[in-house]
Amino acid sequence: MSDSWDFVIVGGGVIGACIGTELLRRNSRFRVLLLEKEKGAGWHASGRNSGVLHSGFYYSSDSLKAKLTRDGNRALRAFALRHELEIRETGKVVVAQSEKEIPLIEELYNRGQANGVDVSIVSQSELSKLEPMAHTHSVALWSPTTAVAEPSVFMSAFISEFVQLGGSVEFNSEFVSADKSGIRTSRGSFSAGHVVNAAGLYADKIAREFGFAMNHRILPFLGLYWYAPGLKGKVKRHIYPTPDPRNPFLGVHLTCSLDGSVKVGPTAIPVLSREQYSLFSGLRVAEVIEILGTLPMLATSRHHNFWS
């Protein structure tokens, strides 16, 4: 082995960078290495998301999702304050399209209350003051602590903090294989006391190298947003529909950006490669074959959605 580390983290996204930072906060003597296959950090899910800072009212109060969303909102705000990063306080309204969706608004409100999140139910007249471009059937949900930020800016700050605390980063270093002696990458080999798998959509593949997740497969979906130039500067709040309990998605919504642009979306299209960011690019033959072989098993599995 050419190098030895206490911890080797595979994946230079937000999870990998923040785990590395926390390890160094707990013990500054740890030798921590972050491996990232790309030329920079956060090139995939960590830098390609909507940037919405959710508040935590969607999930049941006894779920880990609820706790992580609520606490993550507060932690990211504290991080932004320390590093002087911009967060736009948009807030979010969830609107009902018919009488039958009012119970869903009430359910979201109850969950928010149970989760310790600041939410309220507002009338159409109150909604018009909050967001004149939004309309609802009778009532809507108002979430003042939902916000938006620029993911790539935060990602750079996460990496900077990790390095400042003594962490090391190896870019252009793609995971190849692992055995009892350590990890082999495209840039060399490393021994590690502990390996942290934070490889995003490839986490299942890397887990199998260590004997885990043998019966699990990640199936990618493509989420595309479209910009609405005519709404730039006009929509001030995120506008969401009530979620459909039958689906694990939040529905098509309007998302405000830092510069006032408004995005419409996202789609949720199953794709045939893990880094297929458009309909006609990023296809990998081996992944297409693997995913096509997995889809029939998915069709017969139990459906799980965000309401749990």
Image (tube, rainbow, N blue to C red):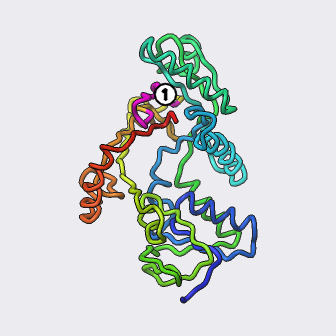
Which residue is tagged 1?
A: 239
Magenta residue check for 246: yes
- Label the magenta part by its dominant secondary structure: loop
Residue 5 vertical placement versus 273 (above, below): below
Image side of residue 98 versus residue 140, left or right: left
Tell which of 291 and 158 is nearer to you. 291
> Where residue 118 sits: x, y (%)?
67, 28
Q: Residue at x 38, y 56 (%)?
A: 217
Q: Amino acid at mark 1?
A: Ile
> Where residue 5 sits: x, y (%)?
62, 79
Q: Residue at x 27, y 49 (%)?
A: 296
Q: Which residue of the protein is positioned furthest toward the bottom in this rendering? A: 2
Q: Secondary structure at mark 1?
A: strand
Quadrant (top left, top right, bottom left, bottom right) of the N terminus? bottom right
Q: Residue at x 47, y 16 (%)?
A: 136
The boundaries of the magenta stretch are 238-250
